[in-house]
Image (tube, helix red, strand yellow):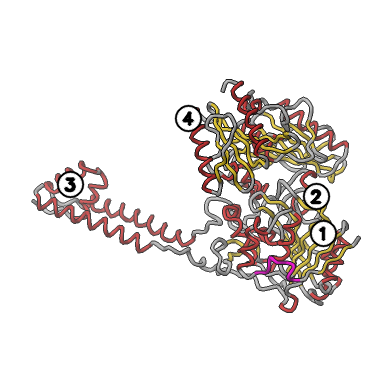
């Protein structure tokens, strides 16, 4: 058998691959030495590969995680990556003019606009932010800014809305998820979470803010839908405007996602109920057991409970009581209750509501 | 193919694979890359004044102008820190293009008063800097700081790409070869950080140490993944002459941007200190938090940057009524 030189052997393997390459190599070994043309092509390919290797070798010395994949080193103009739109974000009241073009931010650069609060939105599935400032035509110091966060779904929009609800919130009549404060409007419209924030509090700016909200809602079509869990909290003693959706890591437990929490006043004592819809009943009971395990691993102690809920667990942890149970595909309970008896009482009303809803 | 030929070819293939792996192993480094060629890392000098370390004052009152004057006087007066001919850099928080009423940024009146006092003490120049990333001009304008600085003769320096140089923090694991807003520091011999007290979604609080974050460029948002160690490294990076923590209005919730006046609380306190760790430790109390809830404070203390036990400094406490 004639010898096949090493280069030709590997090139043939590279070209054909696997067993076909080997059989081809055998063919060549039979035919004889490669031609000059084949050798030249082979060396050419090797030179290209060597060039790539050298390029990677040089480039890797310049690795810097401050610059790889995103804003350039020392960049002061993230606005250019943010993107600009020549169009108005929303039509506003007469007498108002845009102070800047509409800006667009995505997940990769949201923090350029809102810094550390970006994590809140990103963890909830943020897609895009559009924002723009408007001022009175006669006074540029009288301005406001509108922020439209596209969260992808109503549920996610509600999540970021609910966790930021202000203590001085005043519900806006006629809107399901909306409130105003002294200088701002906050509301959910379909998959959008919207903030309109004023720099000054004048009647003109207040009217412009209302106009912004009205025009945005009127001209932005969204899919209908409801958040079913909101109706599953028993109404007695419930702070209806205080229901919050925690998208992830609720109560510090990394498996606790999509958890609704609601504040109650039971016999003048503040309590917190929670519920989370899972895929099926077995997933709900498994997660309840996992959360119980999490509490026990963090210093919790099982406490005997007389509550008439099958499978319910009562845990004392850090001088508070945690009551956990599952009902159908819902995981539910009472969180950090100071009073054991009131926790059991609230849990009973919660399971009755869940049972009544046919869960 | 006979057995001998098969073994020969298998040996050749094995040798090729072994050579490739050996070459890759030879290239592998388990330590971060060294300085960029031609871009030796810069390090900020120590701007603190050794004889004045450990000074702190806490002054209560609603009027920032009065409280900052009293607070500075209580620790020896601005003249103790600023001498004739000094070139002063004020690092403010201009992170957002938001109005002063939201208290998401350093108050412009406070900036103006501190700059004025520096000039009065003999400073030859006062510059005001921050790197808001998103549209710096809008941030300085809409926060009112550009106008405030202009009125007292201070100069706002807008960051440009050329203003940044790579820096590596001493002993740092995160801030290595990181772009630092360096050029404005050239020729400066006094640095004063001026920050508001704010809640922060990621770190729990944004005060004097977190304020240095605004000196970084690049993809600094990834530092939020290890925010407490990042803030500690920021405090290692900058040894200021003085820090001013403005707790006149504290952002209690929804920080660091806020957005509603409902996020704010009048806490009517001005803190001035040569110890940034102590200033933040006291600031935590304005937010209703403990030092243990803000791990970066303990980390900074452990790194020898100051004390979280601010009472050990015997802070001067006064009120402007």
Which one is in front in this view, the residue at disc 3 or the one at disc 4?
4
CB atoms at circles 2 and 1 under 8 Å apart? no
Q: Is residue B60 left or right of residue A357?
A: right
- As measured in the structure, the alpha-carbon distance from the residue carrying label 2 to the one carrying label 3 is 81 Å
Q: Secondary structure at mark 4?
A: helix
Looking at the image, is B274 positioned above or below residue A243?
below
In depth, the one of A344 and B221 nearer the eye is A344
User: What residue would you read off at disc 2?
Assistant: B265
- Image quarter hosting the C terminus of chain B: bottom right
Query: Disc 4 marks which residue?
Result: A282
Q: Nearer the viewer, mark 1 or mark 4?
A: 4
Asked if badges 2 and 4 are on one and the same chain, I answer no
B293 or A123: nearer the eye?
Answer: B293
B312 part of magenta stretch: yes
Mark pair 1, 4: CA separation? 54 Å
Q: Can marks 2 and 1 be said to lie on one chain? A: yes
Quarter of the image where one finds residue A105: top right
- Asked if both marks, 2 and 3, belong to the same chain, the answer given is no
Does A114 appear above or below B184?
above
Relative image position of residue A209 (x, y in whole percent): 80, 35
- Check the residue under mark 1 and report the chain it is in: B
Q: CA distance from mark 2 to mark 1?
A: 11 Å
Eyeballing the image, is B241 above or below A351? below
Q: What residue is at 71 percent from the left and 46 percent from the top?
A: B254
The label number, if any, that marks residue A25 in the structure image: 3
* Secondary element at image label 2: strand
Mark 3 element type: helix
């Amino acid at each position: 058998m004639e010898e096949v030189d090493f280069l030709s052997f590997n090139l043939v393997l590279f070209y054909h691959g696997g067993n076909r390459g080997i059989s081809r190599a055998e063919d060549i070994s039979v035919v004889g030495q490669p031609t000059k043309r084949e050798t030249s092509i082979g060396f050419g390919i090797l030179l290209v590969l060597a060039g790539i290797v050298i390029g990677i070798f040089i480039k890797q010395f310049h690795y810097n995680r401050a610059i790889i994949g995103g804003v350039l080193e020392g960049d002061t103009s993230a606005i250019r990556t943010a993107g600009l739109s020549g169009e108005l974000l929303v039509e506003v009241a007469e007498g108002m003019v845009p102070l800047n073009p509409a800006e667009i931010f995505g997940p990769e650069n949201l923090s350029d606009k809102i810094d550390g609060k970006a994590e809140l939105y990103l963890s909830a599935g943020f897609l895009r932010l559009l924002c723009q400032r408007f001022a009175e035509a006669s006074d540029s110091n009288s301005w406001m800014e509108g922020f439209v966060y596209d969260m992808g779904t109503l549920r996610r929009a509600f999540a970021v809305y609910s966790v930021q609800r202000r203590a001085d919130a005043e519900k806006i009549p006629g809107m399901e998820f909306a409130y105003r404060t002294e200088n701002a409007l906050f509301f959910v419209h379909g998959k959008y979470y919207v903030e309109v924030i004023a720099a000054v509090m004048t009647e003109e700016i207040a009217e412009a803010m209302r106009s912004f909200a009205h025009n945005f809602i009127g001209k932005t079509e969204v899919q209908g839908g409801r958040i079913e869990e909101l109706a599953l909290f028993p109404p007695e003693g419930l702070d209806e405007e205080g229901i919050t959706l925690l998208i992830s890591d609720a109560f510090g437990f990394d498996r606790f996602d999509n958890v609704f929490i609601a504040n109650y006043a039971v016999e003048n004592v503040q309590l917190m109920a929670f519920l989370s819809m899972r895929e099926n009943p077995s997933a709900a009971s498994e997660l309840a057991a996992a959360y119980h395990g999490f509490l026990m691993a963090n210093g919790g102690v099982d406490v005997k409970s007389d509550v008439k809920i099958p499978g319910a667990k009562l845990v004392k942890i850090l001088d508070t009581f945690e009551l956990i149970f599952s009902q159908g595909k819902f995981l539910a309970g009472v969180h950090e209750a100071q009073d054991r008896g009131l926790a059991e009482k609230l849990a009973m009303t919660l399971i009755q509501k869940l049972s009544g809803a046919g869960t | 193919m006979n057995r001998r030929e098969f073994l020969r070819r298998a040996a050749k293939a094995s040798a090729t694979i072994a050579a490739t792996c050996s070459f890759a192993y030879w290239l592998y480094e388990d330590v971060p890359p060294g300085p960029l060629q031609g871009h030796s890392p810069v390090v900020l000098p120590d701007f603190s004044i050794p004889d004045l370390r450990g000074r702190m004052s806490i002054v209560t009152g609603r009027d920032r102008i009065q409280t900052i004057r009293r607070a500075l006087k209580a620790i020896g007066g601005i003249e103790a820190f600023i001498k004739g001919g000094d070139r002063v850099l004020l690092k403010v928080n201009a992170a957002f293009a938001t109005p002063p009423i939201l208290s998401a940024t350093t108050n412009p009146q406070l900036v103006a008063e501190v700059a004025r006092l520096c000039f009065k003490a003999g400073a030859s120049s006062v510059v005001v800097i921050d790197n808001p990333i998103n549209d710096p001009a809008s941030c300085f304008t809409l926060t009112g700081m550009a106008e405030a600085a202009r009125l007292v003769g201070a100069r706002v320096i807008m960051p440009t790409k050329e203003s940044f140089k790579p820096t590596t923090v001493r002993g740092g694991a995160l801030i290595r070869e990181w772009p630092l807003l360096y050029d404005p520091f050239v020729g400066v011999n006094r640095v004063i950080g001026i920050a508001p007290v704010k809640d922060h979604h990621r770190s729990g609080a944004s005060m004097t140490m977190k304020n240095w974050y605004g000196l970084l460029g690049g993809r600094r948002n990834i530092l939020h993944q290890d925010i407490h160690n990042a803030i500690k490294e920021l405090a290692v990076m900058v040894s200021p002459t003085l820090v001013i923590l403005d707790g006149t209005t504290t952002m209690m919730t929804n920080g660091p941007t806020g957005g509603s006046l409902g996020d704010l609380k009048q806490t009517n306190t001005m803190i001035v200190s040569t110890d940034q760790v102590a200033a933040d430790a006291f600031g935590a109390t304005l937010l209703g938090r403990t030092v243990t809830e803000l791990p970066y404070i303990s980390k900074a203390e452990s790194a020898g940057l100051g004390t979280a036990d601010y009472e050990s400094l015997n802070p001067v406490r006064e009120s402007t009524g």
